[in-house]
Amino acid sequence: WMVPVGRKRLIHVSSDEEEDNLTKEEKAANAKEVVPTAKVIGLHPSSPSHNRTRYIVTAPPTSKTNEGAILVVPMDIRIPKIRLRSKLSSDVLVGTRLVVEVDDWEVDSVYPNGHFVECLGKIGDLETEISCLLLEHDVSLTPFSAKAKSILPSSNNWSITPEDVSTRRDLRSNCTIFSVDPPGCQDIDDTMHAKVLPNGDIEVGVHIADVSHFVPHHSALDREAMIRGTTFYLVDRRFDMLPSILSSDLCSLHGQVDRLAVSVIWVLSPDLKTVKSTWFGRSIIHNVAAMTYQQAHNILHNKPPDDPNQPPPPPLTAGSPVDTKLIPSLKKDLTILTKLARILRKNREEIGGAVDLSSGDRGSELKFSLDENGLPTKVVAKTEMEIHHTIAELMIMANGHVASKIHGHFPSSSLLRNHRTVEQNRFEDLESAFKAGGVSFDGRSNMALAESLRQAKASGKDGAVIDSLFQSLATRAMSEAQYVCTGSKEASVGLSHYGLGIEKYTHFTSPIRRYADVVVHRLLLAAVTKKDDADVRMASLDVGVNRNALESIPDSAAMSVLAGDGLEGGEQKEQSDELEGDDLLDFLLEETSQLGLDGDDDDGSNKLDETKADDETKETDGKSSHAEADPYSTAEVTKICEGINHQNRISKLCSMSCQRLFLSLYFRGNTDVAPAVVIGLRANGLLVYVPKYDMKGPVFLSDKDGNVQIHPSVMGLPSKAGLPPTSGFAIVDGCKRFPDGSCDICNADDEANKYLQVIVPAGSSSVHCDFRLLDVIEVQLSCDTSDVVARIPPTRLHLISKGKKPKIGRTNETKVTTKLVEQRQKESSVTNDEHTHPMYKAIDVDISRNVYHIFSSIQIQPNLDDTLPRFLQQQQQNHTKKTQKQKRVQTMPGRFVFGGFRNPDTHTASQEAAANAAAEAAAQRRNTVVQGQASSREYDVVRRIEKDIMSRMQRLAAEKRHTRRAKAGK
């Protein structure tokens, strides 16, 4: 919450100088009011950043005191005003952001004393506000030192040396390697490839920028990168962890250039269900196409990858035009990777009961369009496509395998990613929402949580809006992920990753922007070589030839952390909540709960690689100990984890604050209307959640004096009813004030049946409007900065119209049937196969909430079943077979059916009967919705208003005609 929220009433936050402008009578009246009091019983130690004495402040126009000092208002709403004594004139200080340091606080004074430090700039200036944001979060990003820059190579004369070629695996000629990133991306960390081997097996590779090659261990550059910890991403800029010559050029895996990489290459069975071997090591790659997500999506859907009407992107960024000769090869490779991702996802859901939170924070991925001054002109939520999930799956698979590898070699000094179990009391808000919807909730384990969310989704009519609320509440209930050293005390509670459902997990795939990945790279390379930073031998590395395949793990015996397997005492250990990173890929990596496909042996390492490393060690010194190859000690990794955890937290908070700042700047001159869900009732308004912007906020229905201020149409009254609104509500067109109205909570002691009732007079009688939990309403978003000086206020929400409460829990009314799905499939030009999964749909939360619009927004996915070279020749034949299969598909109650997808669970006879009953009613659904709208009270009110307007216009026209005739008669 960006503003204080009371348990009984919403709190009106006054403007900066309001209390200083009160009259003596008003101050005396306030002094007589009963206010809460408290007693200090202890001081909780805080972080060093909270023990600061410097604050960003603003001097309001009426801030001068009788003593000649100036009362300045801190940007932090929790800090009291500060009495500032300065030789500078108050006229000079007013209207600027200042940095003030607190000197003392006299016992008999209401305010502390401070002195002027520096001026940051004018209020409202974008650069000034960004500087304030960085200072408020204690972000100090000094330029790289001369000593750190002295070891950097020159981009003009750098090239891959013969030594690099001789000691690395050269993949430039035998693999079609490509990347998929957001448009305009400069720091391209990861590339990938897929190909069919001569024996029918499939090779899949993930290739990550080799940052450790350019950043020597313990160098000045390494120390400064460790202090930064991560790249800070803001809406309009970024602050790199590494110098730009590395982050944007030499390390970045740009298209059409040769680059150094660290690779993970798997050989899988033809059906992609068994990992036969895994290879880790340094490599040389050539990225043939640095694509955007949209380009890759278009290729998969047989569309031109590039838009001729769009200008080409800047050099050395993602999104350059794709060579038309590469499109068939890229489509085949993307097809293989997409099928693999679907198998991975399906296994995780069916085996581990994964918690899918991928849509719980769509608002955290807002995209802003900026004008020439850097101010926002448009804001939209980033579109989620199946290709995002595909790339995320590959990164998760690589991270999981690398984690197992380094932990197997360095059990006491590895850096892993850890999530702990959620305490039950943190699910209070989510549990209350479930109860309001009539759905049972169980959060004792992640598997139970996943099942609860699936039941709520299956039984909810307003799926797009309510499902986003449930997932957002579940996400916020979870603890943040942390980096841990496997030999530290923090690791004693377990190492598994709750959110992803993986026994061991780390960060390996983004070393350009995360220092943790650089550490993991060094650990991995030490694990597969004889000594630190030595290169892997190239003998017998032809993956897929003369390899002894490992046995695949049967599905029934596969490791499942979600089920508690493989952990001490059979208990689950870890938890996830991560919103880490600034692009959609990193968001999906941390928010989708998944169980990895693992071909490694019991101790987490691959037998082939471990045997090869041991054999190479024995050839030289006859020892198998890894002690001399360990690049880090336990104490060193522990200290690194503490630093990067702190920096990641600051980076995340800074990014969120910057996004809120740009939202406020956007809504300062624009408004938007979006659906919202009621999540709390207060005596003077509502607490709502807006899925489109992933925003929670108050909606006031009465002012501080108790006057109801609401749009007459919400109450079913004509637009002329009521009095003009006060300034805080005047921004909403048509809002009116009702001094004799009331706003009260009814059945306050009954959580299941309580509601907020708004009553306003209507002639000799009165009308009322009730609001309950999970009601879907429409709100207007705006930002009024007219009376606020000290800080840019948060976006404000105003009630526009009241929708209908979703019928959650009434399964028979909300079944989605096969006939409607098949009808929608006929309208699509792309068919589905048996691997298509419901996770790859995208529903726009902005649309009207009915079944027709929900089906209209579903993205039907392409046929990606064939991965062998016979793909093009067999496509037509497979299409015919799959069409026949689709006609036999039976619907699982409460779920969408995509193509030939079949849930493995057995349906009961009662469920089949319910599905059949719903199928018979589905054909009439669209007409029912239209008829329901026609008979609703809102529709009748509109009609009455229209008739009233028409009659008034007719009377006015008649009067004008009468006047003209009278003048003509004279």
Image (cartoon, rainbow, N blue to C red):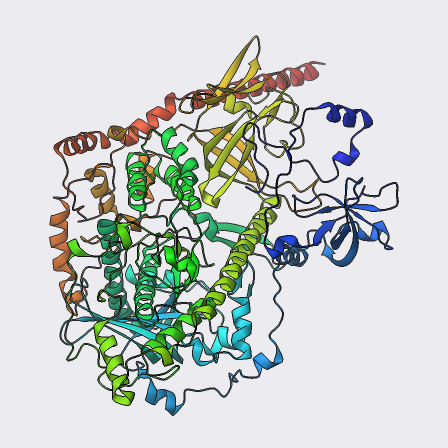
Decide: is 615 above or below 444. Answer: below
Asked whether 160 or 371 is in front, the reply is 160
- Residue 432 at x, y percent in the picture: 41, 32
Residue occupying image coordinates x 82% and y 27%: 24
Q: Is residue 962 visible?
A: yes
State which quadrant residue 450 falls in.
Answer: top left
Residue occupying image coordinates x 16% and y 43%: 905
Q: Determine whether, in the image, residue 958 is placed left or right of residue 74.
A: left
Q: Determine whether, in the image, residue 384 is placed left or right of residue 875.
A: right
Q: Residue furthest bottom?
A: 162
State which quadrant residue 925 falls in.
Answer: top left
Asked whether 32 or 795 is in front, the reply is 32
Q: Determine whether, in the image, residue 471 is placed left or right of residue 862.
A: right
Residue occupying image coordinates x 37% and y 84%: 534
- Residue 766 at x, y percent in the picture: 54, 12
Quarter of the image with the C terminus is: top right
Q: Is residue 513 visible?
A: no
